[in-house]
Image (tube, rainbow, N blue to C red):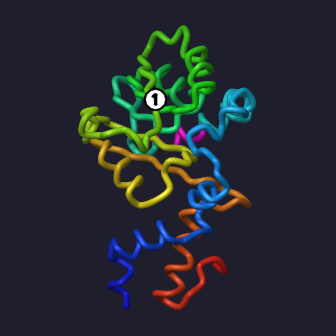
Amino acid sequence: MINEFFKETVWKEAWKEDQQTAVNKMKKAGMDQVHHFDLRAKSFNEQAFNEEGRKRTKRIMKWLEGQGVTFKDTSILDIGAASGGFTVPFAERGAEVTAVEPSLPLVELMKENITGITNGKVKIVAEPFEDIDIQAKGWGNAFDFVFVSMCPAIADWESVKKVLSCARQFCYISLSAGSREHSLLNEIWPLHSRLFGTDLSKR
């Protein structure tokens, strides 16, 4: 029974067929994942760069440094970069950042936010990460550090593997926290319960 937990086919089935996942709910509602944030770009940008947003960014970067991540002269892939909430401080610390962001309103705001950065470099890739051919781009194991923070494109195991394949040394993937649980957690709990007869949601 435990061996089932480690079978890739079991996870694929759980992610693709469960209609309660965030991705499937959005598809069912006819929502466009890529342009979901277009109308909220300005408010999202304000939240990323206000005092609270900067404190959050600094806290996460300090934690990353504690794990051995450095930023100066580091190649970084920032997936779902939005308006540059992390791209900007990465580059300000001397990193060469490739920022992937499909929302054009957010891209325009990021272009404004990266103006004047002299320590590092920023290259913006304005297309959905899920549509990018990693091999064609030459991104396989190409980045010292791959960073993903609450990006809706990371919705199943295939997308996680795609992210990991870009990293040469470090990879950071964060999920949404708080009262709204990330779909990956909702997918893991029922599977774990079926396989082991326990309910993780009550722990």
Quadrant of the drawing holding the N terminus = bottom left
Q: Amino acid at mark 1?
A: Ala
Q: Is residue 110 magenta?
A: no
- Element carrying mark 1: strand
Compared across the picture, whether 173 is left or right of 60 comes to left
Residue at the (59%, 55%) spot, across then down:
27
Residue 197 higher or lower than 19, as above or below: below
Compared across the picture, whether 58 is left or right of 166 comes to right
Among the 4 quarters of the image, the one containing residue 94 = top left
Quadrant of the drawing holding the C terminus = bottom right
Compared across the picture, whether 126 is left or right of 60 comes to left
Residue 25 higher or lower than 153, as above or below: below
Segment tinted magenta in the rendering = 59-65
Residue 6 higher or lower than 36, as above or below: below
Characterize the magenta stretch by its predominant secondary structure: helix
Among the 4 quarters of the image, the one containing residue 12 = bottom left
Among the 4 quarters of the image, the one containing residue 2 = bottom left
Residue at the (75%, 31%) spot, across then down:
43
Badge 1 density bin: few <14, some 14–19, many ≥20, Cα 10 Å? many
* Place of residue 29 in the rendered image (x, y in percent of width and height, measured from the top left): 67, 56
Residue at the (40%, 54%) spot, across then down:
160
Residue at the (56%, 40%) spot, across then down:
34
* Place of residue 158 in the rendered image (x, y in percent of width and height, measured from the top left): 38, 57
Q: Nearer the viewer, residue 74 or 178?
A: 178
Q: Nearer the viewer, residue 138 or 58?
A: 138
* Place of residue 172 in the rendered image (x, y in percent of width and height, measured from the top left): 45, 47
Residue denoted by label 1: 99
Residue 131 higher or lower than 11, as above or below: above
* Place of residue 53 in the rendered image (x, y in percent of width and height, measured from the top left): 69, 34
